[in-house]
Amino acid sequence: MSDTNSPGSDQGPGDTAWQEYLTGGGQAGGATAASGEPEGPAAPRRVIGTPSPAASHRMLPPQDDGGTQPPPRELPAGPEDPARAKKAELVVAACFILAGLAGLGFLVAYGIIGVGSIVAVQHSNLALGGTLSIAMLLLGAGATIWVRHLMPDVELTEMRHPMHSTEQEKAAFKETFEEGAETSQFVSRPIVRRSLIAATIPLAVAPIFLLRDMGPLPGTSLDTTVWRKGLRLLVYGTGDPITPAEFSSPGSIISVGPEGYLDDDDAMAKAAVIIIKFRPGEVDYTSQPHPVGGKVVANWSVDNIVAYSKICTHVGCPAALYEQTTHHILCPCHQSTFVATQGAQVIFGPATRPLPQLPIGVDSSGYLIATGPFHEPVGPSFWERS
Amino acid sequence: MSIDRALGGTGTWLDDRLHGARGVRVLLRKIFPDHWSFLLGEIILYSFVILLLTGTFLTLWFQPSMTDVIYHGSYTPLNGVRMSEAYASTLHISFDVRGGLLIRQIHHWAADLFMAGIMAHMIRVFFTGAYRKPREINWLIGIILFTLGLLEGLFGYSLPDDLLSGAGLRILEGVIQSLPIVGTYLAFFLFGGPFPGNQIIPRLYILHVLLIPGVILALITVHLFLMFHQKHTQMPGKGRTNENVVGAPMYPYFMAKTGAFFFFVFAACALAATFAQINPIWLYGPFNPVAMSAGSQPDFYMGALEGALRIMPAWQWAPWGHTFAFNVFIPALVPLGLIFGGAAAWPFIEQWITGDRREHHINDRPRNAPTRTAIGIGVITFYGILWAEGANDIIADHFDIPLYWTTWAARVGIFVGPVIAYIITKRICLGLQRKDNHLVEHGVETGNIRQLPGGEFVEETRPVSDERLAVLTSRVEHPPLPPGETAETDVPAPGMRGGLGRVRERLYKVVTESTPIPSSHGNGHGNGHGNGHAVEAGDGHEHAALGSGTGPDSGADDEGPQH
Amino acid sequence: MSWITARRRHPAATYALVGLVLVLIGLGYTVITNGNAATAASPTSANPAQIAEGRNLFVENCATCHGLYAEGRAGQAPSLIGVGAAAVDFQVSTGRMPAASDSAENIRKPDKFTPAETHALAAYIESIGGGPPIPSAAAVNPAAGTYGLGQQLFVADCAACHNFVGAGGDLTYGKFAPPLTASTPTQIYEAMLTGPEAMPVFNDLTITPQQKRDIITYVTQVRSQPNPGGFSLGRIGPVTEGLVAFLGLLLFLVLAALWITAKHGKAHE
């Protein structure tokens, strides 16, 4: 990065074409240093218009190559208006002093204000955050005023250099590279080259192999849940079993899970179920022993109580929003809407499959139980799902 | 300690070992052009620094473990509740560590600011054409950083294992699962089994604190180095050419300004963390897979993906025992894929269409590249509609709009909106160009009316100032394409042949559509307008009376610059 | 001249005056509208006088929609036979009934009747069809529940409509689940028990009275819990947080950038 900034130093005859192409002819202000406005390319010198207020407005000279004298002064020593600068100095100092005090306040607040309750944390957050904010704001303001009002306005120019290398540089590079390739005989001895590549392939692939044990293969685990015949439905959060006589108010819904699995998150992520109680005549039943589109399997319900998987078939959020009046189950994530009286078929939103219905019945004590597993995979679709 | 002694002592010690005087001097004198929009990138840089500092603090207490514990701590309402260690340790940081909640909130606000800054910076670079040669590599690095930032934020706010972010992880798992062929395998490998498992939090943790920040840090370093090496672009203005850089030197000016800005960025994060509660996980409760809340959204930078998922109709195809879940993997992959892929390809597409392979170091004013600006606004409209749809239930609730209407509006809007935005933006740009041309050719109205001897009233104009004139005339003409098949040559130039060549010609006309560049030496002199201007020495320059024709005098038209 | 008069031409004077008037208007509105806050009174056991009073109130205010004997009118208002005193107490004390307009959903508004009148109406409806009674004060006592258990039940069964902390949420076709910030413990109990409008029913055998108290404890405590991190931004999650980041923080920094890079003293034209 310590290259010269001037365009003149490394150019050969072929490079003036680039300059002219860019500038439309005419040389940019080259190494002519010092005072006056920098020349625009091919633009006539203007005599009207306001000059820049910058006290120093000049072209930076190119790098001196280890000269014996120090370079001439490039930046003005101080601001143009000393009186205004004096005022600004006081403002900046005040900002920094107050910032320091705020910082001190931060340390004091840390020491004095403890945490350990909601209210204490509220006070601590306000005090620590407030002092920190004030300190940062004042530091920023002070620094800004320093730059804008203490430092004199300056507008300097330095030259870019074209990004591409010169023809000689490129030729030299090519030469060196080809020399090295030739000496290494990488190209001229194909057996060596090819065997090297063959040797590295297994090792390059090895890291991918090492990742294999990150997880089990899915197998058929996505096809099933823990539900099976005889498992009681327990109300989530309370763990109580429930009878149809208790779950008797039409328009009721509650989240349930299989007995023994309520605290097992892995199981509940697929086994969460909602049961809904309908009024007689509300449900569109089918007498078929298996799901039919848009219908509730009558055999799988008890006393107008229907059980559906709670796991949305879109991307798996628990879909618990139930509108008693419209019988819509609405998943709050992406608004897939299922009609609970019609086999939870989808009427809006991105879900493509209805919520699977869980076959339920009652056991000898009268509690609701599953009478079998789900007849299809629950939750989001996946490649292997038919 | 005086400067002489410091440089003599420490300075010499270092220089003896590093040969630094010349190189560091170049750095000290390096000229930085000055424009407020050039500081947008610094928002990102300094937010990242703040993220590193606050994040390290958080790692001193956070437990990346999904082992269940029963909580007993300072947030007494949740005493006795079963939760993961990750969640419990986050409660501990918030309520039992002094400054813990503040640092947690600064960390999260800085992350939001990081992403907001990336969007603002990317938009600035796009609309000023600063991605053009030689800066395409930096543009690509920026897009990669954007993507990494998205992932980093997603993984970060999922670490506390609360109900809201856990729902987000469920959605992530469902999306991965839906990918054809490999989806279930990837999901099981990432989560170490079925959802939720007990591996995902520790795995996301190491991605979030080590791997992704490492890559981001490396890429930011390369990004900044390239910017240093190629020198920053500059806005058009007087004395600014394509071969120079005009501004103030790094030392002391730019150092001071960027230091000040660092304090402001920190102040912004601190103010937000003091007065605006963010991610109150104790209100969401620990994650459990049976629970869900209305109004669940990811952090705003994931909003467009969320909106895409909501907008998608229920399309799937299930032939021969397998399912193509279009309804899931299309919104997950296509909209952002198009935007990021299009953005990555855009510098090269623009180069191909215009044939412009010159280096560009002067920024375009957005109005001077009407098609590019219009395309950019169109893309922003597309992204913005998806983003708004991501919050559609909250919008519907707040503004009393029926829920399904918002989704239908967005479904139509993402196709219609960008087109309308393109058309309107392009017209606005061309209009602004005409305004600029008018100023150049006729000067600025002074508001002084004088009466000519013949009785007419004219308004005096004065020429535009030098600085402004340089800006107004900064548009550079595109070089013409080599002749294609429409020309009367035997063989069209390479790159202009065949159907693709015709497409290229057509696109060239669209992309370079602009008003003619005004002749800058008009500037109030009224050359060649044919209106019989009175030019009186000593009174400045005057313009024609207002009513004397709107034809040739109506600023730029399509007949060419001379009229 | 008083010090206010001396500053009447201060640049900030107009702003101060407008601000003062706005504050006064706001205060006045609060005072006026808060006068009608329903208090949860314990229901007395029904007596014939109360039922008669309820019958009169019903005929005057409710019969036009619900029918002269609460049998309902198709397409207009449902039958109230069997809904119980709890449903009436809920609907009337939250001001939803009498309904103001035929919108997608009735909203909470200042209640029209005193607590005594509300109980009379409730007693009347209970007398003609039975149904869940108004819960006692002990039944809805927020101090008698456990926050943690209530939170678990709430996020599993209620938050999908009402949001984590009861800040409300959207439903389909213009309906919405209201925020729970103003609901009394009695009203919360009654809403669970009777399932008003689109809300499902959670009877006392599905969610037991103790579990209902747990939920009431959660709802009433969480809504009054202080926000240790600053302003709550509505407690609806990342949407408002993102707005603050974009419209607040980014804008602030753009202004800071404009300040830092501003050129002073330059003549624009």
Image: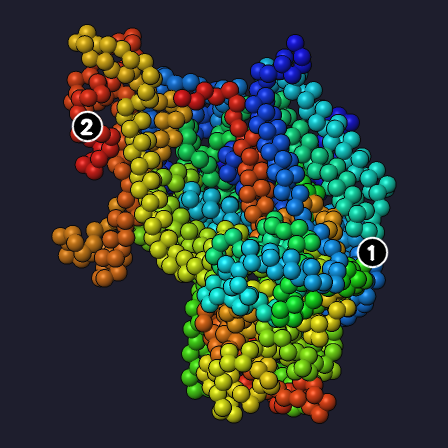
For badge 2, the amino acid type reads Thr
Q: Is residue A213 left or right of residue A108?
A: left
Q: Closest to the observer: C118 or B172? A: C118
- Residue C258 or B518: which is nearer the viewer? C258
* Residue pictured at 26% horizontal, 60% vertical: B500
State which chain disc 1 sits on: B
Q: Quadrant of the N terminus of chain A?
A: top right
Provide residue A271's location: percent of width, then percent of height. 64, 79
* Badge number at residue B209: none
Mark 2 or 1, which is nearer the eye?
1
Secondary structure of the residue carrying tag 1 is loop
Residue found 50% across the figure and 38% down from its top: B37
Q: Residues within 10 Å of mark 1 (few under 14, many from 20)?
A: some
Q: Percent from the top left, x then y, of residue B411?
A: 40, 61
Residue at 69 percent of width and 63 percent of height = C48
Cα separation between marks 2 and 1:
78 Å
Q: Say whether marks 2 and 1 touch (CB < 8 Å).
A: no
Q: Quadrant of residue A323?
A: bottom right
- Where A162 sits versus C20, above or below? below
Query: Is any part of residue A188 visible from this angle?
Result: no
User: Badge 2 sits on which subunit?
Assistant: B
Q: Residues within 10 Å of mark 2 (few under 14, many from 20)?
A: few
Position in image of residue B166 (x %, y %): 65, 65
Instruction: Name the spot of residue B138 as percent of width and height, x first.
Output: 50, 50
Q: Compared with residue B315, is residue B505 higher up or lower down, i.e. above or below?
A: above
Reading the image, the residue beneath label 1 is B74
Query: Quick check: B197 left or right of A351?
Result: right
The residue tagged 2 is: B550
Of the two numbered discs 2 and 1 on the same chain, state the one appearing first in sequence: 1
Note whether residue C129 is visible.
Answer: yes
